Amino acid sequence: MKERTLTLALMDPPYESAKSTTAFRIISAALDQGINVNVFAYEGAVCLPLKDQAPHANPVKGTSLEEEEHPTTKAFVSSLLAKGNDKPRLTWVNCGLCVDERGAANVVDGVRRGSPADFFKMAGESTNTLVIPTK
Amino acid sequence: MSQYVFIESRDPFESRDTDFVEQTALAIKERGHTVIVFLVQNGVLAARENTGQLRHLAQAGVILLADDFSLRERGIRTEELAQGIQETGIDRLVDAMTQARTKAIWH
């Protein structure tokens, strides 16, 4: 069977919308099916793999850090990159200008810096491309 | 012929522009293409039988899929779904999007 590749453009920042969760689910399901995935993170989405994210306790519920087990988007991105580290492959590119604007250069291993030109190339080489916009 | 996959994430009771998906899907279907509408996030609120939201799409032969994860999050049971709507996993969406001559549109 011919190799398939799906490219996603993400724009929402972490903890903003259910779209990030759906995007992570799409990426995971694609890798499970042996489909290569490219992610081009644009605008606020470049903060999804930000290494400085820290889980926290929940003082409203009175739960500790361990009990809360607060999920961070950087952990999701790391898990997906580990899942897609060979065949199938997950390639995650953060828009460099968006990163600089947000001071978001400290990202988890496996994320690389790029530009919209990378997105253009990825889309051209993919079976299909899905843009998940902020609105 | 092409295949069009519309991913509807919006609550029809909150966003008037969900009509965009219905009208566009119907127009494409009339031109003989395969059309799938995949309901996800608050988009699944339209999948309930008692809303009558997607009747025209079902009657036109548009394939209607509802994301199981989104349904469970919102407490919507399978037996509450309108006729013609299939509950499915997100893997079905991925498979549809990676078929030849397919266009995927998020809304």
Image (cartoon, coloured by chain):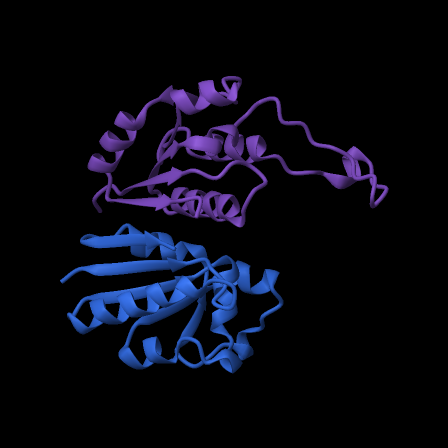
Chain colours: A purple, B blue
Which residue is rendered at x = 51% and y = 76% of the image? B48
Quadrant of residue B1 in the image?
bottom left
Q: Is residue A110 visible?
A: no
Image spot of residue A84 (x, y percent): 42, 33
**Quarter of image, res A2:** top left
In the image, residue B94 above or below residue B59: above
Q: In the depicted view, which residue is nearer to us: B3 or A44?
A: A44
Asked if residue A82 is positioned above or below residue B46 in the image, the reply reads above
Q: Position of residue A34 (x, y in %)?
A: 35, 43
In the image, A5: left or right of A33?
Answer: left
Q: Is residue B63 left or right of residue A94?
A: left
> How many marks on residues?
0
Q: Nearer the viewer, residue B78 or B15?
A: B15
Q: Residue at x 59, y 63 (%)?
A: B72
In the image, residue A76 sits, relative to residue B103, either above or below, namely: above
Which residue is situated farthest in the front direction here? B16
The residue depicted at 34 percent of the width and 64 percent of the height is: B21
Residue B95 visible to an observer of this rendering: yes
Q: Is residue B31 left or right of residue B93?
A: left
Residue A14, position as x, y percentages in the image: 55, 37
| Residue at (52, 29) in percent of width and height | A47
